[in-house]
Image: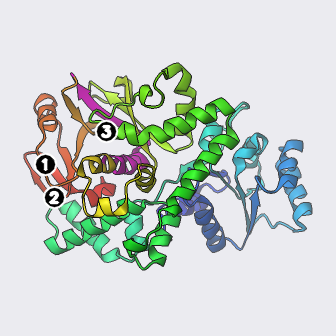
Amino acid sequence: MKRKLYDNLLNWKNTNINMPYMLVGSRQTGKTYIITEFCKNEFDDYIYINLDLMEDIKEIFENSINPDEIIKSIEIILSKNINLEKTIIFIDEIQVSERAISSLKYFCESEKNYKIIVAGSLLGVKINRFKSSFPVGKVWIEYLYPMDFEEFLWAIGEEKMLELIKEKYNQMSPMPESIHSKALSLYNEYICIGGMPVSVLHYLDNNKNMSKYDDNILNMIIMSYLADMSKYTANIESVRNNKIYNSIPAQLGKENKKFKYSLVEKSARSREYDSALEWLISSNMILKCQGIVTPKSPLKAYTENNFKVYLSDIGLLRVLSKISVNEIITEKNMIYKGAFIENYIAENLYSKYKELYYWSIDNMYEVDFLINIDGDIIPIEVKASDNTTSKSLNYYINRYKPKYSIRLSTKNFGESNGIKSIPLYASFLI
């Protein structure tokens, strides 16, 4: 399936291939697939190495981090002559070997122009907890997230609809109502299945028939996440990771979605759970949205202690919340659907901005998200339906006079009184 990251991989190949490429992302986002496709399409030959499965090659890095010695040893183990001009080496699950990560510095500095690309499910955690000297400035680091709605439309063959969505977004003019309705219907199906590639493939394999969609697809991914928590963390931290992850539906179900440790465990304290929370954030399994009282640039300088957390994928949130596909499609559970949609927007914004912020004041007013566009702080309000009444956004506009504001809802494109109305399905364009 087509992914936006492919263009980034091409850019790396064409501009800075001597620097090893590192792809970070949570499990099942499609890292191995997209890199394999890239290697097959763009190089005469490629070598795939999985350090989690190939102990003999993992041992090579324990013995040496000299690129020439590493390549010689790989040639011997694989019984293969490596043509450095034509061959790219893909090292998967590199997080299991800190020495392998350290070696990337020397691959980068070598005059032989090795072509190295690496990936791993928990690389974010490894980077944050690296005991040696991480090769800063020697590695091209990128992140892969679940498929967004644009990639979903590519996958299901709706390129023409996508072109029209982009056109109407740029013009801020309404879509034809029939197409707007179809886009909303597809968006509803997307938030049920989420953006995990295996989930989207299952949807396609069943001819896009939601009545045949099997939630076990997403349940298996959640089980693999919980298994990772057990495999790569100490027992007590694993338990805490698990409790935080499973508390997220309850965290988002509250009217005030500020993260509360008491929903993780009745007697929980932040000092006990901070490490586990950091692990989940670094692993990209959850997204953290920091509270802001003073909306000024740079937003990071004005953060408060309050924060929210979202799940990395809307489909996983639905399954973890025990919400059926039918409840979403028929809008039987509109109260909780608001939390769903907020999570969906958080995913879109995080994949672009790599950080999330929201604004609140006096426990009375709250704007769902803030983004910084060229120094202008833009407020974003999220509505699950076409009800766009908003005391908080109006208060924010009157108080801070933003350049413009954004309201995401099921309403069509439009602009009035400095507020851009953007349909939820077009949020990936913000």
- Camera-side residue: 98 or 228? 228
Instruction: Tell me which corner region of the image, top left, top right, bottom left or bottom right, holds residue 31.
Output: bottom right
Instruction: Tell me which corner region of the image, top left, top right, bottom left or bottom right, holds residue 206.
Output: bottom left
As drawn, which residue projects farthest toward the left? 417
The residue tagged 1 is 388
Residue 266 picture location, percent across and down? 45, 25
Q: Say whether disc 3 or disc 2 marks the residue closer to the N-terminus.
A: 3
Q: Say whether disc 2 or disc 1 marks the residue closer to the N-terminus.
A: 1
Q: In this rendering, is residue 232 above or below 299?
A: below
Q: Secondary structure at mark 2?
A: loop
Residue 272 picture location, percent across and down? 55, 22
> Which span is picked out in magenta?
342-362
Give the crowd class for mark 1: few <14, some 14-19, many >=20 residues within 10 Å.
some
The residue tagged 3 is 372
Q: Is residue 356 visible from the viewing direction of this image?
A: no
- Camera-side residue: 408 or 241? 241
Judged by depth in the image, the label closer to the viewer, 3 or 1, is: 1
Dot 3 amino acid type? Asn
Q: Say whether disc 3 or disc 1 marks the residue closer to the N-terminus.
A: 3
Give the crowd class for mark 2: few <14, some 14-19, many >=20 residues within 10 Å.
many
Q: Is residue 58 visible from the viewing direction of this image?
A: yes
Asked whether the beta carbons under mark 3 and mark 2 sit within 8 Å of each other, the answer is no
